[in-house]
Amino acid sequence: MDVPKDQIATLLEHGLYSSAQMLGCFLVSSPAANAETTPHLKAESLVLLGDALFREREYRRAIHTYKQALQYYKIIPKQSQTTSRSSLPSNRSSSPNSFNISAINENEVKFKIASCHCALSENRAALAEMEGIPGKARNLQMHMLMGKLYRNSRHIRPAIACYKECLRHCPYVLDAITALAELGATFKDIISLFPQTPMRSSKASFDHFDSSRWLQRYVEAQCCIVSNDYKGGLELFSDLLQRFPNNIHLLLEIAKIEAIIGKNDEAIMNFEKARSIDPYIVTYMDEYAMLLKTKSDYLKLNKLAHDLLSIDPTKPEVFVTLSVLWERKDERGALSYADKSIRIDERHIPGYIMKGNLLLTAKRAEAAVIAFRGAQELRPDIRSYQGLVHSYLCLSKTKEALYAAREAMKAMPQSAKALKLVGDVHASNSSGREKAKKFYESALRLEPGYLGAALALAELHVIEGRNGDAVSLLERYLKDWADDSLHVKLAQVFAATNMLQDSLSHYQAALRINSQNEAAKKGLERLEKQMKGVDPDAPEEDDENEVEDADGEQEETDLL
């Protein structure tokens, strides 16, 4: 042959894809690769060219080239097809990233075509190609891709079957373990798929037991998270972290759980520890960005956004981080960034959470409901339930809000945040305040350090004229919490009882903790007018409404 095939394979293996693509054009047009006399050589040449195009991300050209290869493959005499197939090594990879100069395998080429469609987000076309591969001919990569495609198409049962096949091939496919847990498989279901390999020596047997033990704990942790048993999941991941110190994956998983359940300081510490080990991490960095915003640490948030853009500007986490950064400057811009994160990855939950919160702040509660429902369909957690409840309350849909809150309580029976949600719904109606009080108190019994429930209960005390009870409740938390929202609430209560000097000191304390706290700024401005003997409501009637709105938004941000 004028152009040796092994030279293209060498170029591909060394990552010289542009040269491989150009050389592939010579190979395909070579007289030796004649379509009529040597269709098998033509097919093989086209597959090599397709591989080069795939690596250059020219997916449309790659699909076209692979399909041409299959057409030539079909005209190869049956006898030579059988010979070609039998000569294939059994352990060869079907990935478009691997290159083999022996005769082509029809199923591998179909997988490569499906991979191209997948890269173009054409799930239906990819699935059609994959379903053309017989079940017995599918390898680990094929089962994994099919599981992902079925899941994206909401075909749950076949997705579960594919992920189970992955674990039968190899129990260490952690993505398959997580996917099965999220699709409802139990701990016992998953570990029953692990192959029971007999060991010869006692040391080998011990090593196998030790290895399978940590893997089983990992499975158990993922199942705990999916069932909203965050405490159990956190304990299991923490145990694993002791066995595997400075494990970035475990640190990120722990930090994400801590962020969801409101352990913000611990989550920030673990995210920063992971970044100190590997400063180029992108995974879950949008969760970290949301936490930095709650602390009003815009210096770190700005640096994080800059770092992520320089690492990989195509990831959904980057656009959620940009959305968080732009929220206070340009809400429309922030919303467009959140939308882009979802367009990049339709399964990216923080994108939906961020979008829902932005829409809720913009008083577009109906659209916010759709965003929070999108997050719930992927994986319900307390944040999506909180978003739904507050969206329904904004729409005065108390029944729907109560249903969503009870749904959260049912899913998370040991969650103080879920109990507080039910209390929030009851507190929205004057006739339900006594019930609200009971739920807030239950939440505090379950989690005594839950500041959100304490603030809500204090607000209830104030509404019903029990300012002394509100003050004593909040002052108990001052011993352990340096929180700006706590000082703001105390300042508001003292201002309402005309204890202006105490109110002033708490507003100032709030601003020392968080100089960006809008509720504290506006409250202090209002208080200064009162201290000068000026009626803060006299000049403009709208001023009071603006302050109250800011207070409400501050509380809502804390809860969300």
Image (cartoon, rainbow, N blue to C red):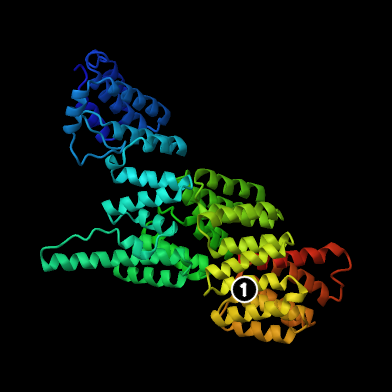
Relative side of 316 to 426, left or right: left
Relative side of 551 to 16, left or right: right
Q: Quadrant of the C terminus?
A: bottom right
Q: State whether residue 423 is above or below residue 357.
A: below
Percent x, y of residue 237: 38, 68
Residue count near mark 1 (Cα–Cα under 10 Å), binned few <14, some 14–19, many ≥20: many
Q: Secondary structure at mark 1?
A: helix
Residue tagged 1: 420
Say which residue appears at 69% left-offset and 53% top-offset: 366
Relative side of 289 to 326, left or right: left
Determine the residue located farthest toward the left in the rendered image. 201
Q: Quadrant of residue 216?
A: bottom left
Residue 273 shows in this picture: no
Number of labelled discs? 1
Percent x, y of residue 402: 66, 67
Percent x, y of residue 100: 23, 33
Determine the residue located farthest toward the right in the rendered image. 538
Say which residue appears at 69% left-offset and 75% top-offset: 489
Percent x, y of residue 395: 73, 59
Q: State whether residue 336 is above or below residue 515.
A: above
Q: Quadrant of the N terminus?
A: top left
Identity, as a three-letter code, of the amino acid under mark 1: Lys
Residue 411 shows in this picture: yes
Q: Nearer the viewer, residue 105 or 359?
A: 105
Say which residue appears at 36% left-offset and 60% top-offset: 248
Q: State whether residue 171 is above or below residue 105.
A: below
Q: Quadrant of residue 63?
A: top left
